[in-house]
């Protein structure tokens, strides 16, 4: 399929570009195309080849549970070849400007000041004919340990557990090339953002931007689309087969940590604490094959395949960490879980069982109070609201109680202030939050890294939406290729699956250990399916 604009269309686009450039230094050029020949998965593979595992890039998708079952989210977003990257390791920040060919390092107290400072130079065009979703900007992850930039005295890096993977604490790519799929209208938006003030004239900016957009178009309009392994879905692969025998803590170590946590709870030091452990599994399945399997095994509202520096994230998170849109700040905690039933009637009965569970309801209210406190830190006085309290949301395998806490950002506050206020959320720490995190430093043996942090995007206009990094598999990308005896050489990957349990006064160590193993087994099913489908 070839797409040509008429001469009149080109002139009209050039005139609109010039008009927008009078008041904006970030202007978008876009094309709308039919996407019945293309999927988000194939579009991603058009932009990033299978062996290019170090290329920062992303694929975001969403599945929401409706009354009649799962529904594909309206939008999917693909991005590759960032114009700039920000990589933070503790307080050292590296900024790589790929367009200018520059690399700078600086030592800062809080790395989030770096993208905030860069964004202050932007004045993006306001566009009505693009979808009301992320259409370009920063994409990446913030690790659990980014809280140490906020609580520098109580949670310094020097007190953190062992850093056995040496992954970045923050990785962000600046994506001025994105493809947004609209699954309702069956079309895709191919978008390129032009930084006008980097050019000698508006005409040069438009000409170069048009060429870059055409190059992006050519990649996804290639008649010879990349061949993906077909894969065969064996329903029996949904059964958990392989045990996760390797972990950062032995069963006895974890159960001892639970008992130590209970001592702090009984002493009144904390009310609750979330203790996690990391499991390990080796596989010859490629992380992208695992992601394709996640879409079948555990479809969720926040699904992501994210290639970053040092690791690849395969995520299927049910929970929003933070949303900031047009000055409104939203936090949506999930706490309280029950399995899905086999029928609608059984689902309803289990929902009633959940909302009548005094222990789970009490824990949920505690987390909501934490959320209100976090949102209130940077919201206008009197604007904090609990919009929904203890709704029951259905997901592919479980149901969660959710609440929505919102506020209006203070006049000079930005999404970065909101992120500092909320992260990490109480559902992955405990209460009181800071004291619980101090004890996590004492009781967990390795740093959490991306797990229980956040991943997502920050638009050129300053809107932010991040998901909580739960049900997230981390694949470190350290070098090394081995053969598994098949004609096609494959890399052996180490998959890290982390999970935790909320410890309260009456917690039983054996039960909490089993909960961790059960939670880690769920994403491991995707690896089972990937091996069954693609390695046979």
Image: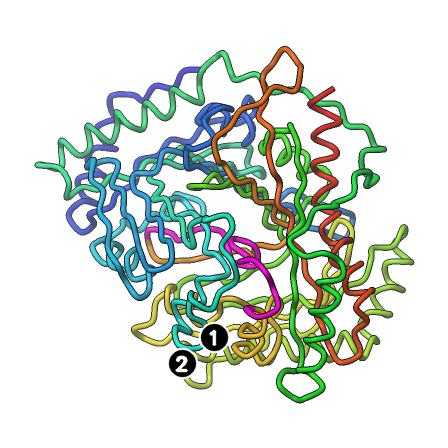
Q: Earlier in the sequence, mark 2 or mark 1?
A: 2
Nearer to the camera, 351 or 290: 290
Residue neighbourhood size for the residue with mark 1, other residues' Cα within 10 Å, grouped as few (<14), some (14–19), many (≥20) = many
Exactly how many numbered labels are in the figure? 2
Q: Quadrant of the N terminus?
A: top left
In the image, what residue occupies the spot 64% across and 29% down?
285
> Given the current orientation, which residue lies at the most extreme bottom position?
268
Q: Which structural element holds mark 1? A: strand
In the image, what residue occupies the spot 44% across and 51% down?
457
Find the magenta span and give its range: 441-460
Residue 241, x across and y down, in percent = 82, 38
In the image, what residue occupies the spot 46% across and 48% down?
167
Residue 334, x across and y down, in percent = 66, 66
Disc 1 target residue? 407
* Residue 281 vertical position relative to residue 168 in the rendered view, above or below: above
Task: Determine the image quadrant of residue 425.
Answer: bottom right
451 on left or right of 208: right
Can residue 24 be seen by looking at this rendering? yes
Nearer to the camera, 5 or 410: 410
Q: Tell me the tag on residue 216.
A: none
232 on left or right of 219: right
Residue 434, x across and y down, in percent = 52, 77
CA gap between label 2 and label 1 equals 7 Å
Q: How is the image coloured?
A: rainbow
Q: Which structural element holds mark 2? A: loop
Disc 2 target residue? 380
- Magenta stretch containing residue 446, yes or no? yes
Residue neighbourhood size for the residue with mark 2, other residues' Cα within 10 Å, grouped as few (<14), some (14–19), many (≥20) = some
Nearer to the camera, 260 or 506: 260
- Whether pointer 2 and pointer 1 mark residues with C-beta atoms closer than 8 Å, the reply is yes
Nearer to the camera, 229 or 120: 229
Residue 523, x across and y down, in percent = 70, 45
């Amino acid at each position: 399929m070839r797409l040509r604009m008429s001469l009149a269309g080109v002139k009209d686009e050039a005139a609109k570009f010039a008009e927008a450039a009078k008041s904006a230094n970030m202007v978008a050029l876009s094309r709308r195309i039919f996407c019945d020949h293309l999927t988000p998965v194939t579009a991603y593979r058009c932009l990033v080849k299978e062996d290019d595992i170090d290329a920062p890039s992303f694929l975001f998708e969403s599945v929401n549970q409706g009354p009649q079952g799962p529904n594909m989210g309206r939008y999917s977003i693909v991005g590759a070849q960032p114009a700039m990257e920000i990589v933070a390791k503790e307080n050292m920040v590296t900024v790589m400007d790929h367009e200018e060919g520059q690399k700078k390092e600086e030592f800062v107290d809080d790395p989030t000041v770096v993208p905030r400072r860069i964004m202050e130079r932007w004045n993006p065009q306001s566009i009505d004919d693009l979808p009301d979703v992320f259409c370009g900007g920063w994409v990446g992850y913030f690790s659990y340990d980014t809280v140490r930039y906020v609580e520098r005295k109580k949670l310094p890096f020097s007190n953190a557990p062992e850093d056995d993977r040496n992954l970045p604490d923050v990785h962000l790519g600046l994506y001025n090339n994105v493809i947004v799929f609209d699954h309702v209208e069956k079309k895709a938006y191919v978008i390129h953002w032009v930084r006008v003030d980097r050019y000698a004239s508006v005409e040069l900016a438009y000409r170069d931007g048009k060429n870059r957009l055409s190059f992006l178009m050519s990649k996804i309009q290639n008649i010879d689309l990349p061949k993906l392994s077909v894969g065969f879905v064996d329903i029996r692969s949904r059964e958990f087969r392989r045990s996760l025998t390797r972990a950062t803590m032995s069963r006895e170590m974890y159960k001892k940590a639970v008992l130590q946590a209970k001592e702090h709870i009984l002493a009144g030091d904390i009310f609750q604490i979330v203790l996690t452990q990391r499991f390990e599994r080796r596989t010859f399945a490629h992380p992208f094959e695992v992601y394709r399997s996640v879409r079948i095994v555990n479809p969720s509202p926040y699904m992501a395949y994210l290639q970053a520096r040092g690791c690849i994230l395969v995520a299927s998170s049910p929970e929003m960490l933070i949303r900031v849109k047009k000055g409104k700040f939203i936090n949506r905690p999930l706490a309280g879980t029950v399995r899905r039933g086999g029928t609608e009637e059984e689902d309803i009965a289990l929902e009633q069982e959940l909302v009548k569970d005094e222990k789970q309801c009490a824990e949920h209210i505690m987390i909501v109070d934490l959320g209100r406190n976090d949102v209130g830190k940077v919201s206008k006085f009197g604007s904090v609201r609990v919009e929904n309290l203890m709704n029951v949301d259905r997901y592919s395998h479980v149901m969660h109680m959710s609440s929505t806490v919102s506020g209006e950002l203070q006049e000079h506050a930005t999404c970065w202030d909101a992120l500092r206020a909320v992260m990490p959320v109480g559902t992955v720490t405990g209460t009181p939050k800071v004291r619980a995190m101090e004890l996590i430093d004492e009781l967990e043996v390795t740093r959490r890294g991306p797990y229980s942090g956040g991943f997502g995007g920050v638009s050129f206009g300053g809107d932010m939406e991040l998901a909580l990094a739960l049900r997230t598999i981390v694949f470190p990308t350290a070098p090394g290729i081995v053969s598994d005896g098949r004609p096609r050489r494959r890399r052996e990957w180490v998959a890290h699956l982390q999970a935790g349990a909320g410890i309260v006064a009456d917690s039983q160590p054996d039960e909490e250990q089993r909960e961790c193993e059960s939670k880690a087994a769920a994403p491991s099913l995707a690896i089972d399916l990937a091996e069954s489908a693609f390695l046979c």
